[in-house]
Amino acid sequence: MLSRLFQIAAVLLLASAIVSCSRAKPAAQAPRPTSPSPSNAGALAPVAAVKAPKAPAKASALASTAVVVLGQPPKSSGGLIPSSWRQPGGSDSDRSIWENFMFETDQTITELRWRGGYDPAKAGAGGPVRNFTVDIYPSIPTGSEPNTAVAPLVHYAVGDNAGERSTEVIGNVQTHEYRFALPIPFEAAALTSYWVQIVAFQSGDPDWGFSVGSLGDGRHFRLSGAPGEGYYHQLVPEDVALQLLASGEGVPTPGPEVARSLEEIAAQMANLPPAEKVSVNAQGIQEVMLVVSRSGYTPVHFAVKPGIPVRVVFRQLGYVPGGNELNIRWGPREGTYVMLSSLTDKKVIEFTPQEPGDYRFSCPHEWYWGVMTVQK
């Protein structure tokens, strides 16, 4: 049923296995960490630092030619992840975060979009966002955290509030959408881990934060601290709500069989082959082997019963550009994302669907997709 179609933006992130927590000396003995404010951008990145033109007009122009290559939508449960500084002077409430990304192929990043809001518990203490900085850092060799000991690869001062536009209320927070078109596109190398840092600047006690995101690797890196304790870095749970867009030149061109709109999706679903019914095995599980190749998924359409556990074993047949990632859903709000790490890797997804309906599964770019029907 079209009303139950699952549309997920592109997502792929590397899973981090190592947690780093290195405390600084107490604040009385150690200087505050360097603020990423535009005033010291030259010290952070003397070659790559660029003062950006205002973003909104350029961002809207790029949107028609760029492709989302990383997508982490806000969680329906809401929540904020602080990433804001008081300017000038800083404060004990200053916080900043990094979110990681990695691509299977080279990508030319042209635009960033993110979601965030103001902490209602602080009653507008920070005032409106006056500026954002956008930095991209390399990883340490293990890929588990950004290399903050070196200057960022690029540093941009947005120069305004990144076209702040109010969207929906999530939880009890009024969220806003932000967009920034990179004046100089960032060339992301294949299979290389990067970390993007976006910091808001406010005139008062900072109260801006990212919306908590979903469909990533479930963690981010942060600079945090408390009065009298100093500042420290650590890897902590939760994604941030973020999108990265790339030039279409760096993305394999989808064939004519790929759905590009709801109308095309509906037409393709009407032409789906009959669903392959998945039987219940001796362990009481409905198990299906889902294989992706350059021709698409096998099976492309299968049916399971509600209330009975389902096990999907996902693997790829040879190298499939973008096909090693799978977004799969089994309910209006239930779903997950997995990524194969090699040609021989396989991922097992287990769930128990409850609500009948048609649920699409796909790679993040929608180049390959299929349907799981939950039927009584």
Image: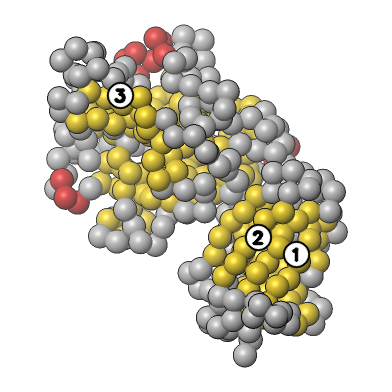
Of 123 and 263, nearer the camera is 123
Q: Quadrant of residue 293?
A: bottom right
Q: Residue at x 21, y 35 (%)?
A: 206
User: Where's the N terminus, which quadrant?
Assistant: bottom right
Q: Residue at x 39, y 40 (%)?
A: 236
Of 286 and 54, nearer the camera is 286
Q: Is residue 122 visible?
A: yes
Q: Position of residue 70 (x, y in %)?
A: 57, 45
- Residue 290: numbered disc: 1
Q: Earlier in the sequence, mark 3 or mark 2?
A: 3
**Amino acid type shown at disc 2:** Val
> Which residue position holds label 3?
23
1 vs 3, front mark: 3
- How far, Cα to Cα, is label 3 from label 2? 37 Å
| Relative vertical location of residue 152 with respect to residue 189 in this rendering, above or below | above
Q: Position of residue 260 (x, y in %)?
A: 69, 60
**Amino acid type shown at disc 1:** Leu
Q: Please tell me how crowded label 1 is: few (under 14), some (14-19), or many (20+) other residues with Cα within 10 Å.
A: some
The kind of secondary structure element at disc 3 is strand
Of 167 and 31, nearer the camera is 31
| Relative vertical location of residue 371 with respect to residue 170 in this rendering, above or below | below
> Which residue position holds label 2?
348
Q: Position of residue 51 (x, y in %)?
A: 43, 20
Residue 55 in the figure: left or right of residue 21? right
The kind of secondary structure element at disc 1 is strand
Q: Earlier in the sequence, mark 1 or mark 2?
A: 1
- Residue 362: numbered disc: none
